[in-house]
Image: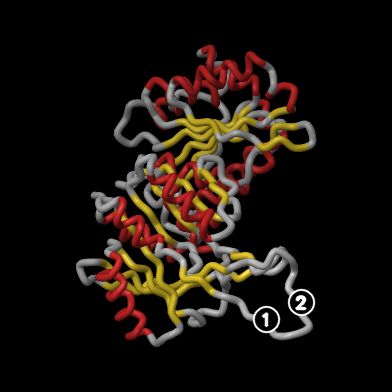
Amino acid sequence: MDVSHPTLDLKSAKSHSLDGKRVVLCVTGSIAAVETVKLARELIRHGAEVQGVMSEAARSIIHPWALEYATGRKAITEITGCVEHVAYCGQRKDAYDLLLIAPCTANTIGKIASGIDDTPVTTFATTAIGSKTPIIIVPAMHGSMYGHPIVRENMKKLEGLGITFIMPKMEEGAAKMPSIEEIVLNVERALSKSPLKGRKVLITSGPNFEPIDPIRVLTSRSTGRMGQELALEAFRRGADVTVVHRSKIGVPGVRDVFADGFEEMRKAVLEELKGGYDIYISAAAISDFTVEAAPEKLSSSGPVDIKLIPAEKLLDRVRHDYPGLFIVAFKAESVGEDELINRAIAALKRSRPNIVVANRFGGVRNPEYNDVYIVEADGKVKHASGKKSQVAVSIMDAVSEHFK
């Protein structure tokens, strides 16, 4: 009876970002091998087909059945007459798309750098290097081993061959594997065929905080989550991403520039744009007003007058200074849907962005979700609703169409 493995029921359960992509997941003898079951299944949840390969040392940490359970395919534990390394990573039309070694020990890094093939993992790696199959290595080892100059030299040598390293997190004296989410994100980036690959993207995100006095501030209800999801989606598609905000994305490769208030954000954006960007996404709730801040805490014993000073329209300044820049503007209003779209169209005419993303404030109560209209300069209007990560995909799809 031909029955598919139950693990495959998870395929594309979270997204379709890796649909049609095939990944060889190589596991070596680090204790972090216990994380590979979760890693394999997460790759599958995003649409990938995963084939496990194990060194003998890895089999002393987890049983091959665990990897078979995780991938829905029998793990490769030796090179046989089927010449598995050539079948999966050779110069063949049906070869897999990516070789991911996670976790990777110092020993395996050294062997790959020296061209030594004495385990299934190192043999797969040598074959992949020779056939120019993309390779990602995720080191995991004791901190003193990671700090060994020859280990670092071997890593640099492999980077020189085009191999990508996802650097470990240093905790408790050990170089531990980064989060599963970070690894999957980098796999998505490595396999992306998006027209945004290599493009420079500047994103503003989150609220501004304008001081009223040394303690109190004027701000908005923005969480910054939409900007964060847009940054991750742009990174996923291969873009070079910088985010101006008061938070931190926390993903190596996404650059954070701190800005608390309007003036800091204005200066940061205009300074960044001097470096030459392809796309500017103004997702932040940039202050419409600044305040003449009191030098001392205002008394709460009576009425207080606060003078609001209209702030410069940063979007207008950016369009004036960079007429060829592709701009995505955001517009939040507390009006009905028809009027929301009309105001987005008016914003297109007034400030001349390429796209306006309009959302009705209060339309969605859950901060993890959003409901927007993507309004383009040519009159196209698209409705996108769901988790903010899903809405970010729709927005970046619209942007990508202009760079094909």
Which residue occupies 57% across, 17% down?
Answer: 154
Task: Report the side of 359 relative to 380 (left or right).
Answer: right
Q: Which mark is residue 143?
A: none
Q: Quadrant of residue 105?
A: top right
The structure's colour scheme is secondary structure
Label 1 sits on what residue type?
A: Val
The residue wearing badge 1 is 304
Q: Position of residue 66 (x, y in %)?
A: 64, 44
Q: Could one spot residue 1 in this view of the protein?
A: no
Which residue occupies 30% across, 81% down?
Answer: 342
Q: Quadrant of residue 34?
A: top right
Decide: is 36 above or below 213.
above
Viewer-proximal residue among 46 and 284: 284
Q: Residues within 10 Å of mark 2 (few under 14, many from 20)?
A: few
The residue wearing badge 2 is 299
Q: Position of residue 402 (x, y in %)?
A: 25, 55
Decide: is 37 above or below 326.
above
Task: Report the side of 26 relative to 23 (left or right).
Answer: right
Task: Report the side of 391 relative to 223 (left or right).
Answer: left
Which residue occupies 38% across, 42% down?
Answer: 274
Q: Position of residue 386 (x, y in %)?
A: 46, 71
| Element assignment for label 1 | loop
Q: Are marks 2 and 1 in contact (CB under 8 Å)?
A: yes
Label 2 sits on what residue type?
A: Ser
Alpha carbon separation for disc pair 2 and 1? 8 Å
Viewer-proximal residue among 228 and 100: 228
| Element assignment for label 2 | loop
Task: Report the side of 370 relative to 93 (left or right).
Answer: right
Across the whole image, how many numbered discs are drawn on residues? 2
Q: Position of residue 285 (x, y in %)?
A: 50, 66
Q: Could one spot residue 94 in this view of the protein?
A: yes
The residue positioned farthest toward the left in the image shown: 378
